[in-house]
Amino acid sequence: MTLDAPGQGALVDTADPRRAPGGPGPLGGKRTFRGRTAPSGSRIIAAIARREILLASRRKLVRLLFLFSVIPPVILTVIILVRIFAEQATGAKLGFDPLIQFLHFQAVPVALLAFGLGTPLVAQDRAEDVLFLYATRPVAPWHYGLGKMLAVALPCFGLLLFPGLLIAILRLGITRELDTAAAIAMVAKIGFAGLVVAWGYAGLTVGPSALTKRARWAQLLSFALFLIPGVIGSLVGELLRTDVPPIGAGSAITELLTALLGDGEWGVASTLILVGYGFLGYWVTTARVKREMIP
Amino acid sequence: MSGTAWIEFEGVNLDRGGRPVLRDLSASLGGYAVGLVGANGAGKSTLIGALLGVLRARSGRIRVLGMDLPGAAQQVRTRAGVMAEQAGVFPGGSGVEAVMFAGQLTGLRRKEALRRAHRALDALDVGEERYRPTLGYSTGMRQRCKLAMSLVHDPEILILDEPTVGLDPPGRLQLLELIRDLKTEGRRILISTHILQDAEFLCDELLLLQAGTVAYSGTISALVGTRDEMLIARGPQLGAQLAGVLGAAGVDVLGSGVDELRFRSSSDALRTFWKLVADRSLEVRRLERHALDFEDAVVEAMTGTRATNGAPPRLGERGNEGVAR
């Protein structure tokens, strides 16, 4: 029994015992295969990222962390609204703008989400021996690496951009504190920070995942990468009694947000550090995959 | 059943970890189903890696469907379906999701990939189990799922690495029949297997690897020949004393032990054998005829005890010469 139309991918129902060896094909003769071109890299990368996000969204821990990441912006919005209404009611300028603190706080649950999303990604594939499967498809190591990185970076970016959008809409549309240009500038700054931080998070979680077959080890390694450089940076600063660039992810995020939305001095260095973490993770992943895609 | 060559090797040398794995490999394969047979470490997996452009040859030329590798690797992988022995199933989701994902990786859109995934799984008799996580699948289910993953994008060629490993006899037979049906559809299939019965059942052509070189390349019918017969003679010191002289007298000696001698049957061979036995006053306690079957032919080709039986010279002539040793 033919299950598909000619040239559309016929497969055979082998339950039919009347099919004689060497007999005519299920379509009554030989099929003609049309030449098919290799898919674009972006389609493959999108397929990898989409699958990982979909599978992660089914995990309870990831759902919980996602919820935990959505709550702070909502609280922030409520606080800002209360402040504005209080200012309007009393006529006094409270001068309290919790945006930077809240964005920094927002980076913590998003980091946990990245942790939950990214650390099993490559380790699981290595444990299940499926890296060669990717090599049997038109998937290059960089497709794989970028797909996995985006599976972490895109949700993180969305969650980091969310408060910026929320507040911009609030200030532009409800309280009318900002004009359109200022609102766009604020969203752009928060978006830029979100992009850099999300890419850094992806590198800090996917990279360690490529170094081991056990998600637990990847989590430990990732945790160490989040913390240890920052501690080393602080110690060096203490010893030299001077300001050193923020080499830890946490301090880099603080400095980046301060530089973008306030008057920090380490904006460029923080950006480079976070982007560097991202590329390091990407490089480790592609290098490892390149080696293990071989049968 | 052979046609235009769809796999061609010309003087391929490929090293792994500084060690030569494929050595001066030349073969041209045009059968609809080609069996890739060889002992462990013969270079089968390396050859599959080279056919997909994952491994690069140090020298020589590899062509699949007329496309040069590794340059056309992406194109070949798009048109090939691969069921890899050592690889599992995409983890984390259900069977149908794994198959759909395999389709998406070859460029199918999500909806189309899902539709084809269901059809492939239907064809492989995978029922409601397709919705279960792949993590709990039995070996048979995993094999079916892997085959569905290799078929979902309707590939022109199939590369199957030990497809029946771990299956129970009914499951194995069902899978073999399905593969045979895929062959009758006009797909080109390369089957790497240790199980010679599987190769005999499915294949019309054979590539026999021995330590990275071609021990035989050609049709199975040419390898088995006209079902030649072998004579097995047993008696004290028969093999020890006669193997050399019988070979020198032009008889095709297929193997020998101290008290055993095996040679290809013909009236001349038998006459020469009896003459030498009489000359040396040896005792023959038993003489029996044995029809050469596929397994014998393969073993002989691999151990180099078999003369070439008129297999048409192909690109892999060196391989055939190796058989003639």
Image (cartoon, coloured by chain):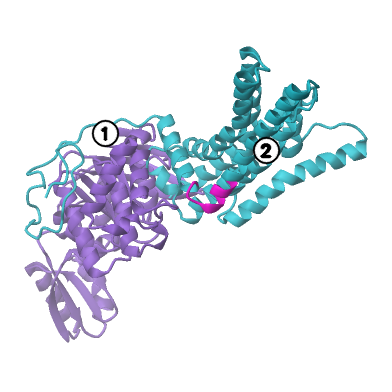
Chain colours: A cyan, B purple
Question: Mainly helix, strand or loop, the magenta region?
Answer: helix
Q: Would residue B116 appear left or right of B267 to someone viewing this image?
A: right
In what element is the residue under mark 2?
helix
Where does the image place residue A91, in percent across and percent down from the top left? 78, 20
Residue at image mark 1: B66
- The subunit letter for the residue under badge 2 reads A
What residue appears at the point 67 percent right and 16 percent down from the top-left corner?
A: A178
Q: What numbered label is drawn on residue A107?
A: 2
Q: Is residue A1 magenta?
A: no
The answer as to whether the residues below labels 1 and 2 share one chain is no
Q: Which residues are magenta?
A: A57-65
- Is B100 situated above or below A86? below
Q: Is residue B318 visible?
A: no
Q: Nearer the viewer, residue A9 or B158?
A: A9
Q: Is residue A64 magenta?
A: yes
Mark 1 crowdedness (10 Å alpha carbons): few <14, some 14-19, many ≥20: some
In what element is the residue under mark 1?
loop
Q: Would residue B187 appear left or right of B136 to someone viewing this image?
A: left
Where does the image place residue B245, in percent across and percent down from the top left? 23, 70
Where does the image place residue B92, in percent across and percent down from the top left? 45, 52
Q: What numbered label is drawn on residue B204?
A: none
Where does the image place residue B66, in percent across and percent down from the top left? 26, 33
Tag 2: amino acid = Ala
